[in-house]
Amino acid sequence: MRRSRENLAELELRGVQQRFHARDVPGGYLTAVDDVSFKLAASPPQIVSLVGQSGSGKSTIARNVLGLQKPTAGTVLYGGKDIFKLNRAEYDAYRRDVQPVFQDPYAIFNPFYRVDRVLWKAVKKFGLASTRAAGLELIEESLRAVRLEPESVLGRYPHQLSGGQRQRIMLARVHMLRPSFIIADEPVSMLDAQVRKHFLDILLDFQREHGMTTLFITHDLSTVYYLGGEVMVITKGQLVERGPVSKVMHDPSHPYTKLLLDSIPQPDPDQRWTTRISTTELGFSA
């Protein structure tokens, strides 16, 4: 069932800066995010990718948006309100409406608890069902929505599941809550190609069928191209380009974006290596 998208709040970063103390850096601090501003609309739902190399500041932005790291300067706004100044009720509503999906799903689970606990905890915390039967029905519906059969995962411990299954269980939790925004921080970097495609297709389903907007954080431009929508390019803590994926990929305006595009391997089945490389050249001793 698609959520109503009327009068939904907007997410906005306004002049966000994040500094960290660093002894070995001139000035004594490192600027991870430098005067970043952008908006994410819940309606119409969209997928916006934030792409950059490791250390560019993209994961710090995710922590800022999720309320896990207060910016050194600037504000993160939800419905026009600073999320770090929300009262308890407002913050609880924010946490439900802005849901994370992290890179390592194993880190989310307590290895001593069955995976059911993650889903039941969401049911109870947010009052998603009035009876246990209704809660179980919701859990099973959400698992099927992310292409998991309930009997294949319920009652099992995290180590008994694959990385793809664990990651999709986190998507099932998102499906249960029906947030306006998903903040996905490198969610497919630990998955193989086939499972990665399934995960991305589920995000696209969430956008089309349930009206969820996703901020997809990645270093991989091929993934960005598959998702479509818009892309923001970040380097050294600064946003340097934003636009429709097709335009940015085919006609980049910033040198850094061009550098990222040039770094994508272009396999040519007609080209064969003709030069032998010795192990010594690769840095191995004879």
Image (spheres, rainbow, N blue to C red):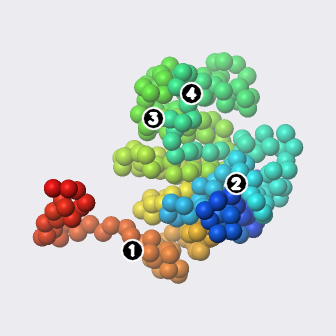
For residue 146, say whether it is visible. no
Residue at position x 70%, y 19% from top? Answer: 131
Residue position for label 3: 165
- Label pair 1/3, CB-CB below 8 angstroms: no
Please give left or right for residue 33 compared with residue 161 in the image.
Answer: right
Residue position for label 2: 64
Residue position for label 1: 262
Measured Cα–Cα span from mark 4 to mark 1: 41 Å
- Return the x and y of residue 119 as percentages of the image width and height: 60, 28
Secondary structure under badge 1? Answer: helix
Residue position for label 4: 110
Measured Cα–Cα span from mark 2 to mark 3: 27 Å
Query: Nearer the N terminus, badge 2 or badge 1?
Result: 2
Query: Nearer the N terminus, badge 4 or badge 3?
Result: 4
- Label pair 2/4, CB-CB below 8 angstroms: no
User: In which image quadrant can residue 221 be found?
Assistant: bottom left
Secondary structure under badge 4? Answer: loop
Query: Nearer the N terminus, badge 4 or badge 1?
Result: 4
Please give left or right for residue 195 compared with residue 168 in the image.
Answer: left
| Residue kind at label 2, given as amino acid type | Asn
Rendered-image quadrant of the N terminus: top right
Measured Cα–Cα span from mark 4 to mark 3: 15 Å
